[in-house]
Image (spheres, rainbow, N blue to C red):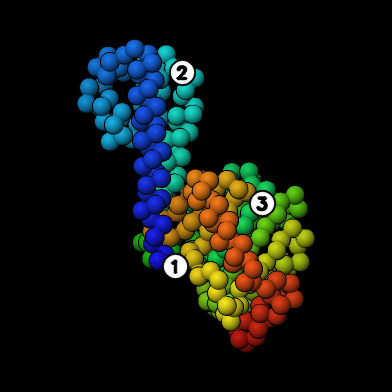
């Protein structure tokens, strides 16, 4: 069930790639150039032009610039490059993302955080990154680095993650967080790390712009547990699977996640009932 997203995400990546290729084809025809003439103007082998136009080869930013200039369509460059990069960000393998360092992966989402006014987060397996303490984040990121056999810069990454999370104190933004009750018991780090983490959740709950819901184990399920996801405003959903980070921007799919979030939200307890569940979990650490 949890992997049902993969083919879909890959399909939408393909769709964006094909759309970019089709647009390049249109630009070439509008300029009245044959495929051969275009290849010649770009200084390419004829087969490269045909591979790009048939979406078999992904054009680099440089290729897109050369293509548009050859056709006198410079004004199209920014949009085409943006679409092409979009396809890249839609489905990114963690191993590739993390091979450049866990810290860089933390920093890479900062611009997205800053653009977002309303963030909705659902987590079924870990405390949301937005409200992780440095100790918890270090333990979690270390286990990710070990599992993926990438360099372990978990401590620097944890510091970056906590710094990035300062945004939660910006009262112009709203945050709705939902976690499954089990997450309060999944241990990353020792008892001390866990008790600090749970204590931090209690303090974050008092912020006026933050709503934290906990779905009790005993809740009657109207929605099964899903892989963790974040909805950024109403424009983008980030879904984390074991192998990849997927960014979904198709309106129809975004609406689907919004609906799931609403259903999960209805099953959750908030306020004093949620605090009681956190205190209960804290009690098991003694």
First-in-chain label (3 vs 2)? 2
Q: Which mark identifies residue 143?
A: 1
Q: Which of marks 1 and 3 is in front?
A: 3
Q: Which of marks 2 and 1 is in front?
A: 2
Q: Name the residue under label 2.
A: 74
* Residue 228 visible, this orientation: yes
Q: Where's residue 216, x and y in %?
A: 61, 77
Q: Residue at x 63, y 54 (%)?
A: 119
Is residue 111 toward the left or the right of residue 91 in the image?
right
Crowd rating for badge 3 (residues with CA inside 10 Å; few <14, some 14–19, many 20+) = some
Crowd rating for badge 1 (residues with CA inside 10 Å; few <14, some 14–19, many 20+) = some
Q: Count all numbered tags in the image, as a single digit.
A: 3
The quadrant of the image that shows the C terminus is bottom right
As helix, strand or loop, the secondary structure at mark 1 comes to helix
User: Is residue 25 shown above or below 262?
Assistant: above
Image quadrant assignment for residue 53:
top left
First-in-chain label (1 vs 3)? 3
Crowd rating for badge 2 (residues with CA inside 10 Å; few <14, some 14–19, many 20+) = some
Q: Where's residue 220, x and y in %?
A: 57, 78
Badge 2 vs badge 1, beta-carbon distance below 8 Å: no
CA distance separating discs 2 and 1: 47 Å
The residue closer to the viewer here, 172 or 249, is: 249
């Amino acid at each position: 069930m949890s992997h049902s997203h993969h083919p879909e995400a890959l399909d939408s990546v393909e769709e964006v790639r094909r759309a970019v290729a089709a647009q390049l084809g249109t630009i070439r025809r509008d300029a009245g150039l044959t495929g051969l003439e275009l290849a010649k103007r770009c200084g390419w082998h004829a087969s490269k032009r045909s591979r790009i136009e048939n979406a078999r080869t992904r054009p680099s930013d440089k290729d897109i610039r050369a293509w548009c200039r050859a056709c006198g369509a410079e004004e199209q460059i920014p949009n085409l490059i943006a679409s092409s990069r979009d396809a890249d960000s839609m489905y990114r393998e963690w191993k590739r993302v993390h091979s450049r360092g866990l810290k860089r992966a933390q920093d890479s989402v900062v611009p997205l955080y800053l653009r977002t006014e309303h963030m909705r987060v659902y987590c079924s397996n870990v405390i949301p990154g937005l409200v992780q303490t440095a100790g918890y984040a270090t333990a979690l990121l270390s286990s990710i680095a070990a599992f993926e056999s990438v360099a372990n810069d978990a401590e620097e990454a944890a510091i970056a993650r906590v710094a990035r999370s300062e945004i939660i104190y910006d009262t112009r933004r709203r945050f709705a967080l939902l976690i499954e009750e089990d997450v309060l018991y999944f241990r990353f780090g020792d008892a001390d790390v866990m008790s600090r983490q749970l204590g931090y959740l209690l303090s974050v709950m008092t912020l006026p712009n933050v709503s934290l819901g906990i779905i009790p184990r005993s809740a009657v399920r109207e929605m099964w547990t899903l892989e963790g996801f974040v909805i950024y405003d109403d424009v983008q959903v980030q879904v984390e699977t074991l192998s990849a980070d997927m960014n979904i921007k198709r309106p129809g799919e975004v609406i689907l996640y919004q609906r799931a979030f609403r259903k999960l939200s209805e099953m959750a307890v908030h306020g004093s009932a949620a605090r009681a569940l956190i205190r209960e979990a804290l009690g098991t650490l003694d």
